Amino acid sequence: MATAAQWLEGARPRTLPAAIAPVAAGTGAAAAVDGFVLWKALVALLVALALQVGVNYANDYSDGVRGTDTDRLGPMRLVGSGAAAPTSVRNAALLCFAVAAAAGFVLAATTSWWLLLVGVAAIVAAWFYTGGRRPYGYRGLGEVSVFVFFGLVATVGTTYVQAEQVTIESALAAVGCGALACAILVANNLRDLESDRTAGKHTLAVRMGDRGSRMFYVALLAVAFVALVVIGVRQPPALAVLVTALPAYRCARLVLGVARGRDLVPVLKMTGSVLLLYGVLLGAALALAPAG
């Protein structure tokens, strides 16, 4: 039986910035148009966190039962290591999805019922990332899903449920957060490139190759900061968030260097930190920006 510490590690807390950052940025965008609603922001955060942990457990389960976690360089997997029974990990994932669904239902009931369709799509995407007979994560489409659901949907959706409108700032913030979230996945898959190739897991990193993946990572960082500059033209306080460009530059240097395998693990942590700072600082800057 897995210990509480192992379950916590299996939840992969270092990936949680991908859930927190877009909600923070989207809330700031809502506040910028006097649409801030605290309880809705907190419920949106619960939805994002539950989905992130749920997809982590779902990936642990699906990869484990397929045997693709036999030779991992990353964090411990509950099923692959034998620490927990597959059914227990699957049930943990389903419980997280149930929490996300319940919280999402509250937001839909108090905003617009069509949001239920978005929630269903998010849960389906979370499960079939590595689940099912033809997981799209094994076909190089994981980054697309991350950009859509942990970028566009999470950020714009957070703004919409509070302000009941979509703003240019929320859309640009969604692009920035989505690009950085994708960069985390690219770094993760770059680390696991050889083991994924051996296991027949055709991630985008496997398809693009080592060099192509490294250039793609840097391009995603660039997209995030271009989006930030455009926001800054409209809302100058947002330009203060450019302070996150320095740690992002350090990440880019490591990725463009000779780091391989386990040596890329620090990049994952650093990129997550950049995303968290980017989202939280951008949200604060938008919230404090003078109404235009």
Image: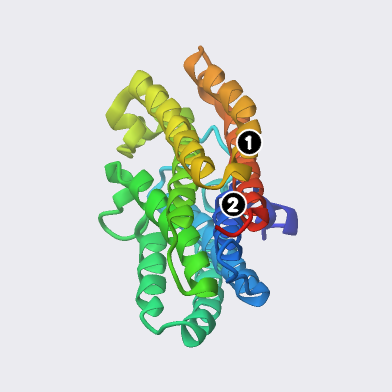
Report the mark closest to the observer, 2 or 1: 2
Residue 158 shown left or right of residue 134 in the figure: right
Q: Name the residue located 65 percent from the left edge and 49 percent from the top edge.
A: 285
Q: Name the residue located 65 percent from the left edge and 43 percent from the top edge.
A: 277
* 60 over 277 or under it: above or below: below
Label pair 2/1, CB-CB below 8 angstroms:
no
What is the total number of numbered labels drawn onto the structure image?
Answer: 2
Asked whether 167 or 248 is in front, the reply is: 167
Residue 164 seen in render: yes
Identify the residue position indicated by label 1 in the image: 269
Percent x, y of residue 93? 52, 66
Identify the residue position indicated by label 2 in the image: 21
Asked whether 131 or 174 is in front, the reply is: 174
Rounded to the nearest angstrom, the CA distance separating label 2 from label 1 is 14 Å
Q: Amino acid at mark 2?
A: Ala
Q: Quadrant of residue 195?
A: top left
Residue 72 shown left or right of residue 211 in the figure: right
